[in-house]
Image (cartoon, helix red, strand yellow):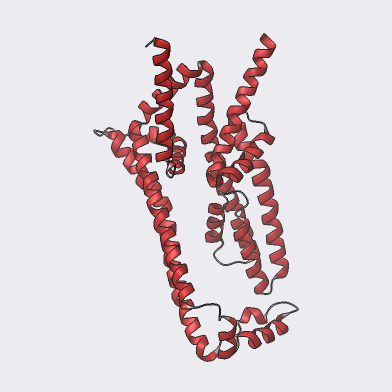
Amino acid sequence: MTTYTQNRACLVAGLSLLLLGVWVLHDFLDLLVWAVVLAISTWPLYQRLLSMSHIPHKETWVGLGLTILIAAVVFVPVGYGLCRLVTEGKNLAELFKAADVNGIPCPIWVENLPWIGADAKAYWLRELGSATATKNAIHWIDSGSVLYFTKDTANLLVQHFFGFLIILLTLLFVYQHGHKLGQNILESTYRLFGNKGHRYTLHANAAVRSTVNGMLVVGVGKGLLMGLGYAFAGLDNPAILGAVTGIFALIPFAAKIIFSACAIVLIAQGHPIEAASLFTYGMLLTMIADNYVRPALIGGAVKLPFLWTLLGIFGGMEAFGMLGLFLGPVLMAVLISIWRDWLHELKTA
């Protein structure tokens, strides 16, 4: 067998094994990518903690501590939200139990609605004010559907819980072996594509980090500014509302859910002018932050044109979901780099 034939056989066998491995791991690929994104974005912090530590096996202990910190950032708010959900579920069950006897009384805020308060109260009492009316209105709720919904929700929570555990385990592995993995990746890209491959890899790494930094800056900024808006509008707990808005602001346009709900509450309390002002303020802030500030922060770090950054963000989310928020700018950054190299070669040819 000639050397050429052996090389081709090795190439075919290697590609076959690669495709087989991808097929085996296809259900976990998105989790692995999430772990890599977290590792790249937190790598400077990990390096700083390593330089400050002088304990044996510091890569493992520092990586474990940082992984636990990331887990706490996710699990603590989610756990609190689930506890509140259980509490509200109990209150809702008690409300339905009382409604079977006396119906659901009209809330005060319905009576205080501007212009339509009296008609809204009359409609409420007619549709929900008695036990018979309440049973007719909520006849679509039965124990079977509630049971299936509860089981589906529990299965979804368990699935996401174990998925996040896989992300954390992969993240810890990357922390422990990140230096060697990074060197191997850079060496491989250099051998395959030369200096260009090395540069594209570093460019993709910078794009991921700039995307995370842009998300955090926009989230914190929008949370602070919306918190001031909530305070001026007269809402209770503006700091908490601002923090929740900042968390939702990590996803483009998701903060609209929070300030829109707050505007509805203001309308229900009889403050339509404050509600309209808060909604307009939130929409303007969201438009500026998501359409201008976020793309500028992401594109500026990797010298990516504004339009391509914006298209990368929204196109990535359309194609890959939340993961596309990172993959889209990375792909655009690498493609623009390839385009610039090609133009440079044409000019120098």
The quarter of the picture where residue 3 lies is top left
- The residue at 45%/16% (across/down) is 191
Judge from the rendering whether residue 318 lies leftward or rightward of residue 179; answer left or right.
Answer: right
Residue 84 pos. (x, y %): 45, 67
Q: Which of 26 and 245 is in front in this view?
A: 26
Q: In this view, does 253 lie above or below 267?
A: above
Residue at the outermost left position: 56
Q: In which quarter of the image is the N terminus?
A: top left
The quarter of the picture where residue 238 lies is bottom right
Residue 104, can we see it? no
Q: Quadrant of the C terminus?
A: top right
Residue 194, can we see it? yes
- The residue at 61%/59% (across/down) is 257
Judge from the rendering whether residue 227 lies leftward or rightward of residue 150; answer left or right.
Answer: right
Residue 24 pos. (x, y %): 40, 40
Q: Which of 128 and 257 is in front in this view?
A: 128
- The residue at 62%/64% (across/down) is 261
